[in-house]
Image: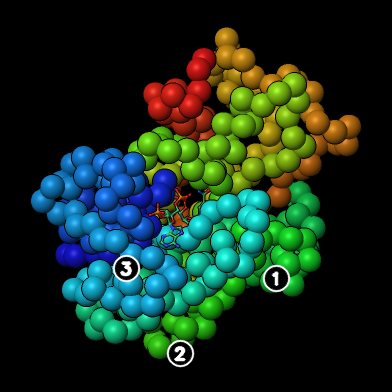
Amino acid sequence: EVVCVTGASGFIASWLVKLLLERGYTVKATVRNPNDPKKTEHLRSLHGAKERLHLFGADLLEDGSFDSVVEGCTAVFHTASPVSLSPADPKAELIDPAVKGTLNVLSSCVKTPTVRRVVVTSSIVSVAYNGKPLTSDVVVDETWFSDPAFCEESKLWYVLSKTLAEEAAWKFAKEKSIDMVTLHPGIVIGPILQPTLNISTEIFLNLINGGQTFPNASYRLVDVRDVGEAHIVALESLSANGRYNLVADVVHASEVLRTVRKLYPTMQLPGHRCSDDKPFEQPYRISKERAEGLGVRYIPLDVSYKDTIQSLKEKGFLSI
Ligand code: NDP
């Protein structure tokens, strides 16, 4: 079976490509620059890549860029989307590539009758930001939608890009009768396959590598291996439909550090002091029922912390 993965060089997509190759799929994968070894070498060296991985150059903002890649595929995993938390020009850097790019990829799918399902890597950020306070009694389930006006007022540009992209995707999929599933991971951690540091792993690195204090904040965490598996389940499960949150747990920074301290007693971690004097933000819940119903299971977070730290060490991003 031939499937397409957009944005294949990324943190999540690299794992997805690896798992797809292990399952015997043939993968047509896009990167912006297939001649850049930093983006492709780790993919080319995956088991099965020589025989079944085909790399293509494609850009989200170039109309028709994905047509020839999607051709002949039975499924498309659309993961490519810019991730940046402080863009100089939010529209050009985040919103346009996210929204136009998604519609560009979906348009290629409409032109290709062999495509039976599209799995889009959305985010929990397109679910949870509607202005309702996230207090400890709250359960965020898939009926929640982030509110673009709230995101714009709060200048949450990445959140806005993912929210508008998802909204546009559902509108287009309904109009064109595309069988689409959207996945909504939290902050993804776990072993890194690509040579560069992506933003979610950097967030984790900053937390454990931080200064004297830790932030009074909760993190919605999930392991990249589970996110990769969930993409495949979303394709292979006939009954998969709609939106699926992918969050193993919502954990306060202090709790993450407590566990890491137990795993690495000699590691230099931020002190026991919180960055503000307020009571600890109590974590809310993200519902897991829909994803678990599909068969998604989560690696325990202490295992994810350990494997992330190990990988950060191996890649030279962390010295402990
Ligand atoms: P990375 O930054 O590692 O990867 C992003 C990918 O998007 C890269 O492969 C990049 O391609 C591609 N991309 C960006 N802009 C363009 C463009 N204009 N044209 C073509 N490709 C482009 O990110 P992640 O693996 O972390 O994220 C992958 C997806 O998962 C994104 O959609 C992100 O929003 C979503 N997500 C990530 C979470 C996380 O915590 N990591 C959480 C929830 C959702 P290239 O390398 O070729 O430039």
Judge: label 3 CB < 8 Å from ligand 1.
Answer: no
Inter-mark Cα distance, 1 to 2: 22 Å
Secondary-structure class at tag 2: helix
Residue 81, image x, y percentages: 48, 60
Judge: label 1 CB < 8 Å from ligand 1.
Answer: no
Amino acid at dot 1: Asp
Q: Which mark is residue 175?
A: 2
**Residue 169 visible, this angle:** yes
Secondary-structure class at tag 1: loop
**Quadrant housing residue 175:** bottom left
- Determine whether, in the image, residue 246 is placed left or right of residue 85: left
Q: Residue at x 69, y 37 (%)?
A: 252
Residue 135, image x, y percentages: 78, 52
Amino acid at dot 2: Glu
Residue behind mark 3? 76
Inter-mark Cα distance, 3 to 1: 27 Å
Q: Which residue is outermost to the left?
A: 51
Q: Which mark is residue 296?
A: none
**Quadrant housing residue 281:** top right
Q: Residue at x 61, y 25 (%)?
A: 209
- The answer to whether residue 254 is above or below residue 234 is above
Which quadrant does the N terminus fall into? bottom left
Residue behind mark 1? 147
User: As rendered, which of 288 and 205 lies closer to the eye?
Assistant: 205
Q: Do the CB atoms of the residues marked 3 and 1 lie less than 8 Å apart? A: no
